[in-house]
């Protein structure tokens, strides 16, 4: 299928971008059909892993350690 051939090297392309590429190749297909076929082929994008939540206490602790390491360098 043409959608698979387009989506395989372009991993981060969603169905809208693929539909645009198909229209440039003179395919008469709308976004709803592309989405249905895209979903059936299992090409839907994976969600990105969320960033870890860092507490404010951890940030203060890291800053304090960083400052204590650098204070000796600037004192000389």
Image: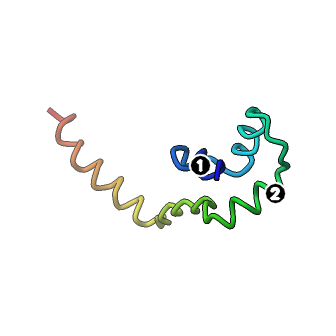
Q: Residue at x 32, y 55 (%)?
A: 64
Characterize the local packing of mark 1: few (<14), some (14-19) or many (20 or more) Cα atoms within 10 angstroms: some
Colour scheme in use: rainbow
Q: Secondary structure at mark 1?
A: helix
The tally of labels here is 2
Quadrant in which the C terminus is drawn: top left
8 left or right of 38?
left
Work out whether residue 62 or residue 26 is closer to the camera in this orientation and state it: 26
Distance CA(mark 2)–CA(mark 1):
15 Å
**Residue 34 at what x, y percent from top left?**
76, 54
Q: Earlier in the sequence, mark 2 or mark 1?
A: 1
Would you place residue 55 above or below residue 74 in this image? below
* 2 displayed left or right of 22: left
Q: Determine the secondary structure under disc 2.
A: helix
Left-right relation of 68 to 64: left
Q: Is residue 34 above or below residue 76?
A: below
Check residue 41 in the rendering and tell me which mark sits there, or answer none: none
- Residue 7 is labelled as 1
Q: Which residue is mark 2?
A: 33
The furthest residue to the front? 1
- Depth check, front residue: 10 or 73: 10
Q: Residues within 10 Å of mark 2 (few under 14, many from 20)?
A: few
Residue pictured at 63% horizontal, 61% vertical: 44
> Is 21 in front, or is 55?
21
User: Please, is residue 74 above or below residue 9 in the view?
Assistant: above
Looking at the image, do the residues carrying marks 2 and 1 touch, with CB atoms under 8 Å apart? no
Give the x, y percent position of residue 71.
23, 42
């Amino acid at each position: 299928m043409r959608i698979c051939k387009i989506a395989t090297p372009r991993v981060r392309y969603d169905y809208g971008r693929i539909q645009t590429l198909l229209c440039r190749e003179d395919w008469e297909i709308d976004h709803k059909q592309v989405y249905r076929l895209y979903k059936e082929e299992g090409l839907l994008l994976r969600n990105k892993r969320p960033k870890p939540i860092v507490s404010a206490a951890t940030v203060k602790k890291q800053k304090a350690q960083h400052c204590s390491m650098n204070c000796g360098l600037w004192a000389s």
